[in-house]
Amino acid sequence: MKYEELLLVVGKEAVFRSSLLAAVSPNPVDLGRQLSRWRKSGRLIQLRRGVYALSERYRKNDPHPFTAANLMKSASYVSLQSALEYHGLIPEYVPSVTSVTTGRPEHLANSLGSFIYKHVRRTLFFGYRRLDLEQGQRAFVAEPEKALLDLLYLPPGSGDPAYLRELRLQNLASLNMGRLKDMAAQTKSPKLMAAYLSIHKLREEDRT
């Protein structure tokens, strides 16, 4: 495969898996060698095994960190602080992209940034949707209510109302409280049902 062929196949994909090239380069050994050569020559950036981005000189779009996060880890969606910032529920800039996954937890770092994956059991893997991002890119991102529940479920001590206040949540009026309650009930977690009540109280305080 020539590099021009790669560009035709990849098209406008800012981030891609090597499996995308299988149709035009069916020999995995040859494909692996060619990808390695392009990486060493600076034409490709390897984000992790089997996941690549075109070098800045050759790309049409800059990779969105959320799209990269999805592709670097199967069965994952962006959540916690990253999704809360995206939805405007916390004021702070979040330097790492944090996702939840049914796979093993992991922390990856590459030229696009820092990516953290938190493990959740399969029964908690819901409450996300595919969003349209910049430049035609898409990614699975938690709905605001689920991002908040994910954040309150994972860390020790996060069920404490004081922890909620430390998050400095904003725009609580934008939350769908019915959806939040249903999601908390779906988890069957007493901790998250208690968290729902604390969030409801905070929201009412904000309205007064």
Image (cartoon, rainbow, N blue to C red):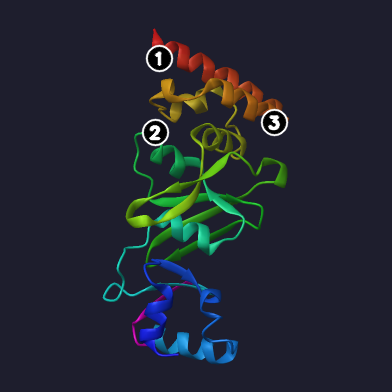
Is 84 on the left or on the right of 184, as rendered?
left
Q: Residue at x 37, y 62 (%)?
A: 63
Q: Is 11 situated above or below 155? A: below
Q: Which label number is shown at residue 206?
A: 1
Three-letter amino acid code at the position of disc 1? Asp
**The one of 137 and 189 positioned closer to us in this rendering:** 137
Three-letter amino acid code at the position of disc 2? Ile
Question: Which numbered disc, 2 or 3, marks the residue closer to the eye?
Answer: 3
Name the residue carrying label 2: 90
First-in-chain label (2 vs 3):
2
First-in-chain label (1 vs 2):
2
* Secondary structure found at label 2: loop
Name the residue carrying label 3: 186
Magenta extent: 40-47
Q: Is 191 situated above or below 11? A: above
| Picture coordinates of residue 189, whole percent (x, y) | 71, 30
Three-letter amino acid code at the position of disc 3? Gln
Tally the marks: 3
| Picture coordinates of residue 77, whole percent (x, y) | 54, 50
Membership of 90 in magenta stretch: no
| Picture coordinates of residue 38, whole percent (x, y) | 40, 86
| Picture coordinates of residue 173, whole percent (x, y) | 42, 20
Q: Residues within 10 Å of mark 3 (few under 14, many from 20)?
A: some
How far apart are the alpha carbons under marks 1 and 3?
26 Å
Q: Residue at x 70, y 26 (%)?
A: 190
**The one of 167 and 170 positioned closer to us in this rendering:** 170
How far apart are the alpha carbons under marks 1 and 2?
14 Å
Determine if residue 49 is in view. Answer: no
Q: Is 203 situated above or below 7? A: above
Determine if residue 29 is in view. Answer: yes
Discs 1, 3 touching: Cβ within 8 Å: no
* Secondary structure found at label 1: helix
